[in-house]
């Protein structure tokens, strides 16, 4: 068998192997996946490793450490190497590149060349190796080979490795990165002043002319110390010209420092909201099965209020920053942003931990868009959407909404019913809204309880003063004692079943009654 | 639900809410007139087949000419903005102390303001929608049942108020002994006894209630069953 055949065959074998994919997925979860549960533990472990290895390095300066320290150091380096290689491996799929190149060459009827595939692989892996984080990782391992003293400095790069593991530090970095252009301007200005200042001082204060500067390097050192307003005073200008240069440098130093401070401060001020958003998102990652509420308008506020009362986890996203602030003041988790963005929904955990999403904005276009995006991310997620116009209902359903509610339609219905039967309607409305002492509740018949297998008339409904509205059963249940049933998505609702209807375990009695009566019935069914 | 007599209903406003309400009322066979200041939107409503009238709703004389205080029985104040609604409710209440006035509010605070201004009923669409969505999250099966049966658009079950005629077979019965659930496939929720006020006395109330003439029983069931009960009660009367 030729080499190229072997390469292609093993690439396809890897592509098909479930186990390989599983292992790689696990490695990805451990190292890179920001949503995985295990990653925080791994990060914490690595941070401890980094800190203890640097601590040993520092302790080593004045103390003699036994051979266990060397062993520990070797272990740390070994772990770093394994981590480095694992990250390199997880970065992309080698076999995919081979397959791609192979299929491409098949398509245009050219012989497959292994060298081309390898070039492709190397190009991609190099992209990873040359990324800043990978360089830091590499430098953290590399100086373990330490015949050179200066290389020990690089050992401190291990501290930079902390960047990888601590998200707060990453945030710090990303905030400053936004101000790249300003920093660049500042740096150019600084370099310019530095060169001019150090050249001038070298000219006037050189030891040849009775000054204290012994070389150009000392000039640069002095200029920087002066410019930064640190001013050690180990080198002081002696000549008139030298002092003039000093004064100019001090003045521009003040400018540089204040410019620098203002850049940092404004960067953080601008990004304060985003930093908070990220904190919310990281809190969210610890939760599971929560609800995402898009739009914190009136409807959103009502829903959030009820969910909060019930202690159900949820997160709010709104485009308006003031609305987000108001939600936070209520003690809710809230994020500022556009929910229709795919990336934003993903950040909110749609497709991972979010169980349902409510699209409650006042704009139907946005609601449809969010519905579509969420459905695309997660086939199973429950989507409840608000339709402000009747025509949107159909679109929402097509887009993948599980339910839709029309606020204006609700008004129409209520108005219509109100004209017909004001008292009855208001009463039922009150029951459903939980404003009356009487409630409508579903009471489960536990499997194996005394009511399991008995007839409806044997249930203590009359005694407890409960009105039976119907029984909720599994979809397939038939009975002679029901005159009407309604099929729901997952259950069958048997309206007003006759006295001979037989109840089975896991059926639910839907009853109207005083809250106390309902509690009592639940209690009786338990024993 | 059958219309009980021809009432005159005025719907103020021609936005989406007003049109939806008008549609529902028309489906129930009510006679209504849409009024608004905005001629363009009124034109749209007219094309949808409604009787319309362009009126300055802030002018008492024009309100009087609509029949407020004389012919109109119910006024729906469904304008787009809370302040306009409050103003219209106050003016209407001053002109016609007896009529029913139904309005909508956008915020919770306006509910109280509208009630103080004289509205008989204030609907808060956002509160209700929010609660419904919460129900879907909180107890989806019940929400689905209510949607499929009582509150949806093409539903099968209805809530009905049925007055008890003198001498009918229900006259003199105790509320908890009606056994309509086996005879008619109806669920009795309760009764409204005008002697005790306008609220519903639930069938679960421990104080036994004896039904007499002019009481109204509130039942849930299919339309045909409701009709059968109505007929048979009239027959025994």
Image: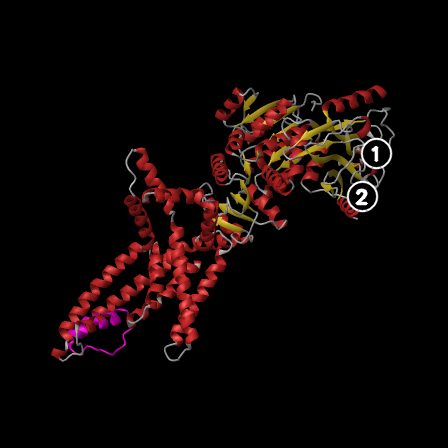
Q: Residues within 10 Å of mark 2 (few under 14, many from 20)?
A: some
| Above or below: residue B193 compared with residue B29 | below
Left or right: residue A196 compared with residue A524: left
Labelled disc at residue B175: 1
Q: Position of residue A328 (x, y in %)?
A: 52, 52
Residue A236 located within the stretch drawn in magenta = yes
Name the chain under label 2. A
How many circles with numbers are drawn on the protein?
2
Question: What kind of element bears circle 1?
Answer: helix
On the image, the x and y values in percent for residue A15 come to: 42, 43
Give the labeled residue for mark 2. Answer: A450
Q: Nearer the viewer, residue A327 or A513?
A: A513
Q: Nearer the viewer, residue A487 or A345?
A: A487
Identify the residue at horizontal 20%, vertical 62% (top origin). Answer: A192
**Which portion, as a residue range, is magenta?**
A221-247
x 40%, y 69%: residue? A73
- Whether residue B61 appears in this view of the structure is no
Label 1: chain? B
Q: Position of residue B194 (x, y in %)?
A: 79, 33
Q: Quadrant of residue A344?
A: top left
Query: What element does badge 2 sit on?
Result: loop
Measuring from the top left, give residue A156's x and y in whole percent.
Answer: 35, 68
């Amino acid at each position: 068998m030729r080499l190229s055949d072997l390469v292609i065959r093993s690439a396809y074998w890897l592509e098909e192997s479930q186990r390989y994919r599983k292992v790689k997925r696990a490695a990805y979860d451990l190292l890179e996946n920001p949503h995985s549960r295990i990653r925080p533990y791994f990060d914490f472990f690595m941070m401890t490793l980094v800190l203890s290895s640097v601590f040993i390095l520092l302790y080593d300066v004045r103390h003699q450490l036994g051979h266990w320290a060397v062993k520990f150091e070797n272990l740390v380096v070994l772990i770093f190497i394994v981590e480095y290689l694992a990250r390199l491996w997880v970065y992309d799929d080698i076999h995919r590149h081979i397959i791609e190149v192979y299929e491409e060459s098949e398509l245009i009827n050219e012989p497959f060349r292994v060298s081309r595939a390898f070039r492709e692989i190397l190009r991609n892996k190099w992209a990873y190796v040359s990324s800043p984080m990978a360089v830091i990782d590499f430098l953290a391992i590399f100086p373990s080979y330490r015949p050179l003293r200066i290389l020990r400095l690089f050992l401190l790069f291990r501290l930079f490795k902390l960047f990888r593991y601590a998200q707060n530090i990453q945030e710090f970095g990303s905030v400053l990165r936004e101000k790249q252009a300003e920093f660049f301007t500042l740096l150019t200005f600084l370099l310019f002043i530095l060169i001019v200042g150090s050249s001038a001082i070298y000219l006037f204060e050189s030891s040849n002319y009775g000054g204290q500067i012994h070389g150009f390097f000392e000039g640069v050192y002095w200029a920087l110390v002066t410019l930064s307003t640190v001013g050690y005073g180990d080198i002081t200008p002696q000549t008139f010209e030298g002092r003039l240069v000093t004064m100019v440098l001090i003045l521009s130093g003040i400018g540089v420092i204040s410019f620098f401070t203002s850049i940092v401060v404004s960067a953080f001020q601008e990004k304060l909201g985003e930093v908070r958003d990220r904190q919310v998102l990281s809190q969210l990652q610890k939760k599971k099965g929560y609800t995402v509420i898009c739009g914190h308008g009136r409807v959103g506020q009502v829903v959030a209020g009820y969910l909060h009362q019930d202690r159900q986890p949820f997160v709010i996203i709104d485009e308006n920053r003031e609305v987000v602030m108001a939600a936070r003041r209520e003690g809710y988790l809230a994020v500022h942003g556009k929910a229709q963005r795919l990336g934003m929904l993903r950040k909110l955990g749609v497709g991972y931990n979010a169980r349902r999403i409510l699209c409650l904005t006042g704009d139907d276009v946005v609601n449809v868009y969010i519905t579509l995006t969420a459905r695309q991310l997660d086939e199973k997620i429950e989507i409840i959407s608000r339709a402000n116009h009747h025509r949107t209902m159909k679109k929402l359903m097509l887009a993948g909404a599980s339910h839709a509610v029309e606020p204006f339609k609700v008004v129409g219905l209520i108005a219509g019913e109100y004209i017909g039967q004001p008292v009855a309607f208001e009463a039922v409305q009150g029951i459903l809204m939980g404003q009356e002492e009487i409630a409508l509740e579903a009471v489960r018949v536990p499997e194996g309880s005394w009511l399991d297998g008995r007839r409806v008339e044997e249930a203590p409904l009359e005694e407890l003063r409960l009105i039976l509205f119907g029984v909720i059963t599994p979809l397939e249940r038939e009975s002679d004692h029901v005159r009407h049933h309604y099929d729901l998505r997952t259950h069958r609702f048997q309206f007003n079943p006759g006295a001979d209807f037989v109840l089975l375990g896991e059926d639910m009695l839907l009853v109207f009654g005083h809250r106390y009566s309902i509690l009592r019935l639940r209690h009786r069914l338990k024993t | 639900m059958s219309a009980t007599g021809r009432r005159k209903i005025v719907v103020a406003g021609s936005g989406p809410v007003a049109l939806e309400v008008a549609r529902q009322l028309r489906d129930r066979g009510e006679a209504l007139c849409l009024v608004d200041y905005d001629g363009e939107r009124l034109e749209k409503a007219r094309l949808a087949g409604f009787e319309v009238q362009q009126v300055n709703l802030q002018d008492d004389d024009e309100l009087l000419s609509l029949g407020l205080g004389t012919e109109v029985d119910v006024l729906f104040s469904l304008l787009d903005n809370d302040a306009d609604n409050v103003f219209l409710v106050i003016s209407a209440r001053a002109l016609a102390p007896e009529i029913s006035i139904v309005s909508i509010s956008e915020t919770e605070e306006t509910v109280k303001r509208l009630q103080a201004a004289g509205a008989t009923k204030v609907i808060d669409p956002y509160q209700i929608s929010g609660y419904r969505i919460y129900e879907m999250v909180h107890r989806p099966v019940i929400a689905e049942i209510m949607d499929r049966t009582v509150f949806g658009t093409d539903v099968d079950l209805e809530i009905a108020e049925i007055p008890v005629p003198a001498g009918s077979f229900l006259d003199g019965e105790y509320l908890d002994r009606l056994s309509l659930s086996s005879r008619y496939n109806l669920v009795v929720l309760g009764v409204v006894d005008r002697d005790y006020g306008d609220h519903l006395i639930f069938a679960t109330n421990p104080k036994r209630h004896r039904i007499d003439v002019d009481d109204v029983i509130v039942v849930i069931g299919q339309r045909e069953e409701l009709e059968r009960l109505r007929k048979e009660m009239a027959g025994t009367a």
